[in-house]
């Protein structure tokens, strides 16, 4: 609605009580959307909820006290199942009113099946109870209900939660679990961010993709998120397929995906994510995250920006010393060996190379995952 009304020339204000839009993705990925939404002249208000509607003054009053004059209000605040009609039956529901079903989509009454947005099913990653209002699970469940009624006895294996949306010119897609959920469940995980091109850079029209991969310390793929102008959906679809095929991060570099310059690079972004994750789990590189680096530097870490000097006009992290990657071997005298070394570049690749050089020379070097691009966008949205 925000996009369509804006394109009609309507002035739109988007109010979100959370600190981000698009709850299925993590904050630093949503921050890319925040920047894009603001560029489209939408007044984006985060971390502020609706307190009341002032019908006389044609305004919305927010929790902060701010008033927004408006001609129309559209509420989009989530869903809940309308299952009151079965409250007095023997069909079991959970505390939130979702209908409980077994692996064959049968309710507590074995002669009654249920499917779609009003049922709770098994989460494919965690095995825990979940409810996901998406078209693919509902469609698949309908097919299985018909099969099971006909006596084929086919299980529903759980919902992964793969989804995609268009936000103005950007595509945002995700599959599996995000960081927020894994933290709440106390599940250990690793994360990486890369910014590859949607196709070969020497072919016109390539755009960067922000791709995030989340995986276990052993290499099991927990989830992925992507934001970009082109090629996002197919990369998330590949990773969703890899999860359902029980592939690990070690299998991703070996995926033989279609390549021609208008569509991809010889090393697809999914391959790149697999290589990076493998480097992390085989201890070729240590990484830190965008929301950790400021505190790590305050605690005495030595921060090196290995970008070229002209790139600093895009901004930089406070406390850094600039030593371009090509000069790092000649300026080792500037780098202390008695401190923890942190390295960053624009997107992470040169930072990785610098860390490999420094590590082989006896330094303890850590790369900023996702580079300055991830850091800058996330910090700007805080």
Image (cartoon, rainbow, N blue to C red):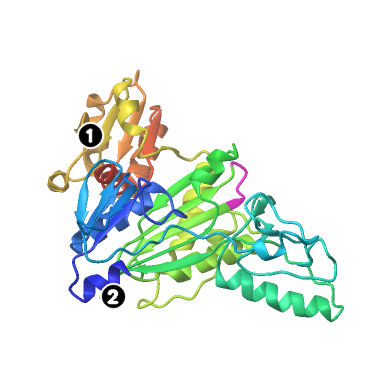
Magenta segment: does it hold 220?
Answer: yes
Q: Which residues are magenta?
A: 217-221
Disc 1/disc 2 C-alpha distance (Å): 35 Å
Local crowd size for mark 2, using a 10 Å CA cut-off: few (<14), some (14–19), many (≥20): few
Quarter of the view holding residue 265: bottom left
Helix, strand or loop for disc 1: helix
Question: How many tags in the picture?
Answer: 2
Q: Which mark is residue 330?
A: 1
Q: Which one is nearer the viewer's eye here, 240 or 119? A: 119
Tell me: residue 46, above or below residue 264. above
Tell me: residue 259, above or below residue 292. below
The prevailing secondary structure element of the residues shown in magenta is loop
Q: Which residue is mark 2?
A: 203
Q: Which one is nearer the viewer's eye here, 179 or 20? A: 20
30 to the left or right of 56? right
Q: Which one is nearer the viewer's eye here, 132 or 342? A: 132
Quarter of the view holding residue 87: bottom right
Task: Give percent across and percent down for residue 94.
Answer: 69, 52
Of pointers 1 and 2, the one earlier in the residue sequence: 2
Tell me: residue 353, above or below residue 365. below
């Amino acid at each position: 609605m925000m996009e369509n009304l804006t394109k009609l020339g309507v002035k739109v204000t988007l109010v979100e009580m959370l600190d981000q839009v698009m709850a299925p993705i993590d904050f630093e990925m949503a921050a890319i959307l925040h920047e894009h939404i603001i560029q489209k002249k939408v007044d984006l208000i985060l971390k502020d909820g609706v307190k009341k509607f002032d019908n006389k003054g044609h305004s919305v009053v927010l929790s902060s006290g701010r008033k927004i004059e408006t001609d129309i209000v559209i509420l989009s605040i989530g869903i809940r199942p309308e299952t009151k009609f079965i409250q007095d039956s023997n069909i079991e529901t959970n505390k939130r009113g979702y209908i409980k079903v077994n692996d064959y989509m049968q309710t507590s009454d074995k002669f009654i099946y249920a499917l779609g947005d009003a049922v709770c099913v098994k989460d494919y990653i965690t095995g825990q109870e979940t409810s996901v209002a998406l078209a693919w699970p509902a469609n698949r469940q309908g097919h299985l209900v018909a099969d099971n009624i006909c006596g084929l006895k086919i299980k529903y294996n759980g919902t992964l939660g793969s989804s995609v949306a268009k936000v103005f010119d950007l595509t945002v897609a995700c599959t599996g679990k995000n960081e927020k959920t894994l933290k709440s469940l106390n599940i250990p995980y690793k994360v990486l961010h890369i910014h590859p091109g949607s196709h070969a850079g020497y072919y016109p029209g390539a755009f960067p993709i922000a791709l995030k991969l989340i995986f276990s310390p052993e290499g099991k793929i927990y989830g992925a998120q992507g934001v970009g102008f082109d090629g996002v959906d197919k990369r998330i679809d590949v990773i969703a397929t890899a999860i359902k095929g029980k592939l690990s991060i070690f299998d991703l570099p070996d995926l033989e995906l279609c390549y021609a310059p208008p569509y991809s690079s010889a090393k697809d972004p999914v391959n790149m994510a697999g290589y990076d994750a493998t480097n992390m789990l085989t201890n070729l590189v240590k990484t830190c995250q965008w929301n950790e680096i400021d505190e790590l530097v305050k605690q005495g870490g030595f921060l090196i920006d290995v970008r070229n000097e002209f790139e600093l006009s895009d901004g930089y992290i406070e406390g850094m010393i600039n030593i371009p990657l090509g000069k790092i071997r000649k300026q080792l005298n500037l780098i202390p060996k008695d401190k923890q070394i942190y390295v960053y570049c624009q997107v992470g690749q040169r930072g990785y190379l610098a860390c490999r050089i420094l590590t082989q020379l006896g330094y303890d070097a850590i790369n900023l995952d996702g580079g300055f691009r991830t850091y800058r966008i996330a910090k700007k949205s805080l």
